[in-house]
Image (cartoon, grey):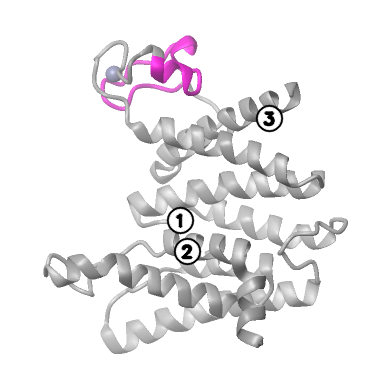
Amino acid sequence: MEHLIFIFLIGLCAGSFANVCIYRLPKRKQVLFGRSYCPKCKKKIKWFDNIPVISFFLLNGKCRSCKKKISLQYFIIELLIGTGFLLIFLNYQNYFASILLSILLVMYVMIFFIDFKHFIIPDVLNFGVIFLAFFKNFLPDLTLVFTQNIILSIIGGIVGYSLIWIIIYLYRTFKKVEGMGLGDAKLMAGIGLLFGWPSVPFVLFVSAVLGLLLVMPSLLKKKRSLKSEIPFGPYIITAGVIYFFFGEYLYNFILI
Ligand SMILES: [Zn+2]
């Protein structure tokens, strides 16, 4: 029991770190040093006001000095990653698998929110995922849906990157717009490296469907044209999560 509480607390701290990165990485600020400050009044936040989740409640969701509201996003991300860590360690007895999944969770949460808000994916995160996704091929059997076959994995990375690259190229040539960015290509390379190449068409298809479904309402209301930029990263990540849980099942279903 104690170790589960410990893992949950580590998860909350990782969530707190993710919040710092989500705020600072798009602004090209370094993330490891420098005290946190209130984004509204710029006052430094005291350590006792910076405790994950608890401080949010004690402060009633408001900054101590300027009394402006603290974004609920901080609280949600801390809780999401804390709970995620707990569920991962409860479900996977394999320590390598648990640690790998926990780090991937933190990185993908960061990419999801940064791309959602700023329409960019910092290279440091994409390359971090790509490194992990390659490195896991050399770990002992993880018994996860991830492939650990180096060839499948590398081809997956190349196919993932190339497919998005081709889509970008076609968009640029025929529609003269930037549909996606190279950040999305690197993100898809990471997915291909993790799951192997058969996952790439699936993830691409599901993310496109998700993107269309979510953009459709505003297209119909003519608030947005197909030309306006949409962050594609969150859809790729969501499709990757769907593949993680149901990929093998879906492929068996299709192949039967
Ligand atoms: Zn403030």
Ligand 1 located in image quadrant:
top left
Residue 143 vs residue 254: left or right? right
Residue at image coords 54%, 51%: 108
Q: Quadrant of the N terminus?
A: top right
Task: Verify CB contact (< 8 Å) between mark 1 and mark 2.
Answer: yes
Per the image, label 1 sits on a secondary structure element best described as loop
Which quadrant would residue 86 be assigned to in this image? top right
- Residue type highlighted by circle 1: Ile
Highlighted magenta segment, given as a residue range? 36-57
Judging depth in this view, the residue of 199 and 253 nearest the camera is: 253
Residue at image coords 39%, 68%: 210
Query: Which numbered tag is attached to residue 121?
Result: 1
User: Badge 2 is on which residue?
Assistant: 183
User: Badge 3 is on which residue?
Assistant: 7
Residue 92 vs residue 124: left or right? right
Which quadrant would residue 181 be assigned to in this image? bottom left
Residue 45 among those drawn in magenta? yes
Q: CA distance from mark 3 to mark 2?
A: 31 Å
- Residue type highlighted by circle 2: Gly
> In the rendering, at what x and y percent does residue 71 appear?
32, 31
> In the rendering, at what x and y percent does residue 59 appear?
36, 13
Q: Quadrant of the C terminus?
A: bottom right
Q: Is mark 2 within 8 Å of ligand 1?
A: no
Which quadrant would residue 213 be assigned to in this image? bottom left
Q: Main secondary structure of the magenta part?
A: loop
In this rendering, does residue 30 appear at all? no
Residue 11 vs residue 29: left or right? right
Residue 107 among those drawn in magenta? no
Mark 2, other Cα within 10 Å: few <14 / some 14–19 / many ≥20: many
